[in-house]
Image: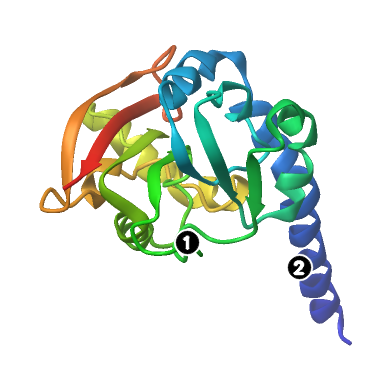
Amino acid sequence: MGFIDRVISLGGHVAKWYERRVLPRAIDIVCGSSIFSGLRQKLLEGLSGNVVEIGFGSGTNSPFIPATVTSYFAIEPSLDALSLSDGRRREVTSRIRLVAASGEALPMATESIDCIVFSFVLCSVEDPKAMIDECARILKPGGELRFIEHGRSNNHNMAKVQQILDPIERVIAGNCRLSRRPYDYIDEVVWLGNGGIERYLGPASPWTYVYSARYEKR
C-alpha cells in the first residue's frame, strides 16, 4: 500500500471513529441542552395511544412522554446514539420500544399509528420527502404529525450564510443541512396544518432558526 493509499485509509478510519464515538455525544450535549426543554415538553404534551418518534437519538424527548401513551416506538438507525439513552429511558422503559430503522423506511403497518413526532431530524435525512411520505403511510386518518426543526432563516442574508455553511455542516454534524425549510416537504393535499411557529431561539445565528408545527393527516 502506497503513502497516498495509507492516508486515505487512515482518513476513513478517523471518519468512522468520529461518526461513531464523537458525533453522537456531541449531538447529545447540544440537543440535550435545557434551552430546548420547553419546546420538547410542548411537542409531546397530550399524546396518547401508539406514538412513533423518528430520530430518537439519545432519548432527549423521553422525560416528557405522557402517561397516556400506550406504546412509544423509538426509531433510530444509530446504535451508538441509542446506547446514550439508557438513563433517560429508565422511568418509561416499559413503554419505549427501540427500533433500529431509518425514517425513510418505517417498519410499521399502514395506518397503525396515532401520532408521529420528531425533533431536529429532517435536516439530516437523505430524503426528507420520503420520510414524510412514510409518516403519512403509517398514520391513521386524523392522526397527528408534530415536529421541532431548525432550518432556513426568513432573513435573506442569513439564509445565504446558511447555504455557504451547508457543505461544512454536513461533514461535522452528521449530514445536517442548515438551509432546509421543513414546510417544503409537507403536501397540503395530504396534511392539514394546525398552526405553527418559526423564529430564532436565542440570538440570531445560522443554527438557531427554529420551526415548530403540527399537522393532521387528512
Q: Residue furthest left?
A: 189
Specify which label sits upstream in the sequence, 1 or 2.
Answer: 2
For the residue labelled by badge 1, is the local secondary structure a helix, a strand or a loop? loop
Q: Is residue 74 visible?
A: yes
Q: Read off the residue under disc 2.
A: 12
| Quarter of the N terminus within the rendering | bottom right
Relative to 183, residue 140 above or below? below
Q: Residue at x 71, y 46 (%)?
A: 81
Left or right of 161 in this view: 101? right
Give, as a three-letter code, the residue at label 1: Met
Q: Residue at x 40, y 49 (%)?
A: 113
Q: Residue at x 86, y 85 (%)?
A: 2
Q: Is residue 208 visible?
A: no
Q: Read off the residue under disc 1.
A: 108
Left or right of 138 in this view: 155? left
For the residue labelled by badge 2, is the local secondary structure a helix, a strand or a loop? helix
Q: Residue at x 53, y 51 (%)?
A: 170
Give, as a three-letter code, the residue at label 2: Gly
Left or right of 109 in this view: 7? right
Looking at the rendering, which quadrant does residue 8 occupy? bottom right
The colour scheme used here is rainbow
Label 1 neighbourhood size at 10 Å, few (<14), some (14-19), many (20+)? some
Could you say where residue 200 lies in the image, as x and y percent from the top left? 36, 18
Looking at the rendering, which quadrant does residue 144 occupy? top left
| Number of dots carrying numbers | 2
Relative to 146, residue 134 above or below? below
Could you say where residue 63 lies in the image, as x and y percent from the top left? 63, 22
* Separation of marks 1 and 2 at Cα, in angstroms: 34 Å
